[in-house]
Image: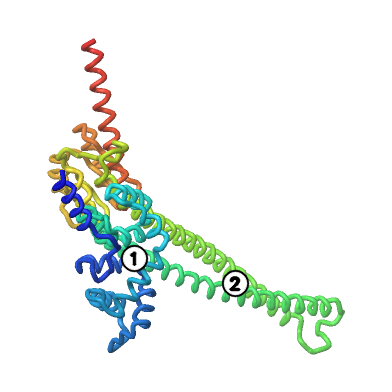
Amino acid sequence: MCSQRKNRTHKMQLLPTRRLKIWEIKHSFHCTILGTCLTMEELRKVMRQSGVVLEKKPSDYDLHATMVGQVESKGRTSRNINRMLDRKYKRWIQALSRCKEEKELRHHWLEARESGEIAGIFWVIMTHPHAGPELIRQAYEDVHMPSHLQGASNRADLRRIKALEQEVTALQETLRKTQQNHHVKITRREDLIRQQEQDLAKVMMETSQPALQSDCGVPSEELQKQNQTLARRLDWAESQLAERDMRIDNLQDEMAGLKELVHEAREEHAAMEQTLIMQLAANNQTDGDHNWRIDLEGKRVLYVGGRTTLTPHLRSLVESHNGRFEHHDGGLEHSRAGLQCTLAGADMVFCPIDCVSHDACKRVKRHCQQQAKQFIPLRSSGLSAFAAGLQQFSIQASKGIDSLANGKQERMN
């Protein structure tokens, strides 16, 4: 009995009694901690406070790499970073200071991961005295891995948004110049009309006199010729004005369409981030809605069309759900004859209607109808639309299994 009491006393003494400092944390975690918990502006502030001087103005990568090296050991810079992190996430530190078991910390981490607000609790878990190696590794993996997938997709979307914004700016400048020219044309037309009215009034006054020649000595035939010339010039000015009005309307329609594309791209960007977060939660949770636990059971998924840059992410999503992924661009670079062979071995086919030729889409749909295969058209070629299509297939498959089981039970009864 005495020996058991001594063992418990010895184990209590081995447990850490205080939060770790950042230089006491394993160095391989420093990169993710600084990248997740501090902004680049905050890192620059610490650099100035700590007197760290670089040879030239550092890029974001240079600054990040320098600070990761500084926190490896105890020093002025590492103490300033630790102090800034404690001040920034003071609310989380106080809230979780009462947690004495790793089970409570894991529960808080899962809630924060589900909501997407992970920076504060990530810092607390990495330094908490009751956070074990398993929980720390899970938190590190949950933060580190999505950054690779999300970063690649975000960079492609940002380039697309930037190109669209530049095109909108160019169209706005063209519209401004067109409106300016339009204003000049209207001013000229008004001047012509005013001049014509004056000339007509002059002609009418001269023709009312009995003499064939006016007081100024200009013959009436000459005035009539001038009047005809002015009338032709007025007709030309009005036709030019109508063409300018039509061009302005077309430019305004194009600009409205481009603004809508930019808006859709930003919405797709936000949806993609949310989809990745939800997918990560679905892969790790043990309880919850079965609709998110997709199991493709080794089926071959064929994706026809779409954007080539997203193909690796689509493949990763399918393979993470126990499926095999194949891609065919619909005939741009891959042969059309090869599409028929690829369709023959597929179990289900996804086809984004906004990024594939009409001919390829019709051929795929006709083949799936003839062979009774699952054909799922997608409204867009984005990653979020494909994830929603997989979820739709999972829901339909589960309903089919349930209805089959119910039918079998009724026959047995």
| Residue matched to label 1 | 37
- Which residue appears at 16% of the width and 50% of the height? 7
Q: Which quarter of the picture shows residue 95?
A: bottom left
Give the SS element for disc 2: helix
Q: From mark 1 to mark 2, how far is it between C-alphas?
A: 67 Å
Residue flagged by tag 2: what amino acid is it? Trp
| Crowd class of label 2 (few under 14; some 14 to 19; many from 20; radius 10 Å) | few
Q: Where is residue 212? Give x, y as percent.
A: 81, 82
Residue sticking out furthest to the front: 2
Q: Which quarter of the picture shows residue 156?
A: bottom left
Viewer-proximal residue among 101 and 134: 101
Viewer-proximal residue among 128 and 375: 128
Q: Where is residue 141? Give x, y as percent.
A: 23, 56
Q: Is residue 395 above or below residue 200?
A: above
| Residue matched to label 2 | 236
Q: Which quarter of the picture shows residue 242?
A: bottom right
Q: Is residue 399 above or below residue 183?
A: above
Give the SS element for disc 1: helix
- Which residue appears at 19% of the width and 33% of the height? 371
Viewer-proximal residue among 166 and 14: 14
Direction from residue 33 to residue 342 in the image, left or right: left
Residue flagged by tag 1: what amino acid is it? Cys
Q: Is residue 373 above or below residue 148?
A: above
Direction from residue 14 to residue 124 in the image, left or right: right
| Residue 358 seen | no
Q: Where is residue 167? Give x, y as percent.
A: 42, 69
Viewer-proximal residue among 75 and 321: 75
